[in-house]
Image (tube, grey):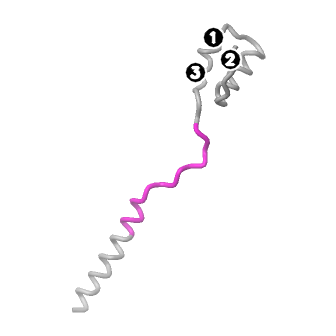
Amino acid sequence: MKIITAFTAIAIVGCGAAVAAAAPAAPSATPVKHASLKVCNKQADAKKLTGPARAQFVKDCRGGKSKSS
C-alpha cells in the first residue's frame, strides 16, 4: 500500500510540473512594431523625400505616427 501511495504522490507532482511547464508565456512588455524600415523607406522613395525630411518621415513611419502630406 505504501508503494501505491508513493507512486500516486510522484504522479501528482510530475503532472503538476508538466502543467506548469506547458503554461503559456506572459505577454512581453515590448511595444507593438509598426511598419518595417523597408516599408517606410519605400514610402519615402515614393514621396521622393531626401535629407532631414526623409529621416523625419521614416522616424514617424516607424513610430506609427501618420503624417498626411
Which marked residue is nearer to the observer: mark 1 or mark 2?
Answer: 2
CA–CA distance between discs 1 and 2? 15 Å
Q: Residue at x 60, y 44 (%)?
A: 30
Q: In percent of the image, x 76 and y 13: which residue is there?
A: 51
- Residue 9's spot in the image, x, y percent? 32, 82
Query: Please, is residue 47 above or below residue 5 in the view?
Result: above
* Disc 3/disc 2 C-alpha distance (Å): 19 Å
From the viewer's perspective, tell me whether residue 21 is left or right of residue 48: left
Q: Which residue is mark 2?
A: 68
Residue furthest front as drawn: 68
Q: Which residue is mark 3?
A: 38
Residue under pointer 1: 45
Q: Where, quadrant-wise, is the N terminus in this rendering?
A: bottom left
Tag 3: residue type? Lys
Q: Which mark is residue 7?
A: none
Q: Residue at x 23, y 86 (%)?
A: 4
**Range shown magenta:** 17-32
